Image: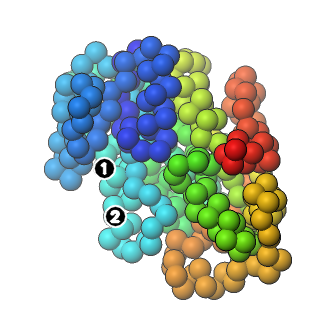
Amino acid sequence: MNILITGGTGLIGSALVKKLRAEKHEVRVVSRNKTSDKNSFVWNIEKNEIDEKAFENLDGIIHLAGASIGENWTEDYKKILYSSRIDSANLLLKTCKNLNTKLNFFISASGVNYYGTFTSDQILTENDGIIHQDFLAKLSEDWENAAYEFSNVADRIVCVRTAMVLAKNGGSFPMLKKVVDFNIGSAVGSGKQWMNWIHIDDLVNMYAYFVENSAANGNYNAVADEIETNKAFMRTLAKKSNKFFLPIAAPGFVLKIVFGEMSSIILEGTRASNEKIKSEGFKFRFPKLESALQELLK
């Protein structure tokens, strides 16, 4: 198939491009800068411009573009978070309509914070709506609404509500590993908040599953089986790294002072269920935290 990926040069996108090309799909990447790759195309979201050649004989789009949420959420940065996700999706849709492009699928990243950023023992499924209204919930809701606008040009739409991605060379894991390596690994805040996570290999395999399975449709939680509390997660990481785990938690108020509103994604967390995709036959390589950490640390 001919597949266009936005955000294809990022942590997840670059791994997904490699996998889909290995499976003999023609993968085109759209980004802000042209590369030497003949299947590289340029867009400018602020100017509402994109190279229309990327849409020739196109079968599907995977929309991964989005600025990192791991920055201080100033009002200006919130606009960047929004534009990089929603305005970019709107540009793709406008171009599809202008070119009369009909897609087999439109697959969009989303966030597991769709349900809200709060701490609870409740296990959330794709049938749950927004429970706690906050910035990330609203951002994820608008992100998904932009995806479902493709219903007139795509046969099916998939939104991937993604947890923290564990990868060796990017995302949160290298930072967590560095803290542990300095023997200062500890819980943060109450330590009772849940940490949804997924190994990057499982996430990439999940996207490939959505591409190749025409029955896949709707919203999916992209999380592993074993969701630990912050305290248990950090203790396990310290243990697997043969490092000390400090019994005293880092105070939550310090993170609030340093990171402001963004600190909520560290200090709060509930659990999301992955039963929907498992019931369809998807198999996780790393369902448990210890096996995932062991692979990342080897």
**Which circle marks residue 79 in the picture?**
2
Q: Position of residue 286 (x, y in %)?
A: 73, 38
Residue 166 placement, left or right of 249: left
Q: Is residue 42 left or right of residue 281?
A: left
Q: Quadrant of residue 212?
A: top right
Q: Which mark is residue 261?
A: none
Number of labels in the image equals 2
Q: Nearer the viewer, residue 167 or 7?
A: 167
Amino acid type indicated by mark 2: Lys
Residue 17, given in percent of the width and then of the height, sits at 43, 30
Image height check: is 56 above or below 36?
above
Identify the secondary structure beneath mark 1. Answer: helix
**Does the image show residue 241?**
yes
Residue at the spot x=23%, y=43% of the render?
Answer: 33
Say above or below: 284 vs 81: above
Query: What is the three-letter code of the residue carrying label 1?
Result: Asp
User: Which quadrant, please, contains the N terminus?
Assistant: top left
Residue in the image at 24% along x and 25% along y: 38
* Image-quadrant location for residue 154: top left
Residue 232 spot, x, y in % from top left: 81, 62
Tell me where residue 245 appears, x and y as whole percent: 80, 70
Q: Are marks 1 and 2 in contact (CB under 8 Å)?
A: no
Q: Quadrant of residue 7?
A: top left
- Please give the name of the residue rendered at 58% of the width and 24% of the height, measured from the top-left corner: 209
Of labels 1 and 2, earlier in sequence is 2
Q: Residues within 10 Å of mark 1 (few under 14, many from 20)?
A: some
Residue pointed to by mark 1: 87
Of residues 23 and 147, the one nearer the viewer is: 23
- Disc 2 packing (10 Å; few <14; some 14–19; many ≥20): few
Residue at position x 28%, y 41% from top? 31
Secondary structure beneath label 2: helix
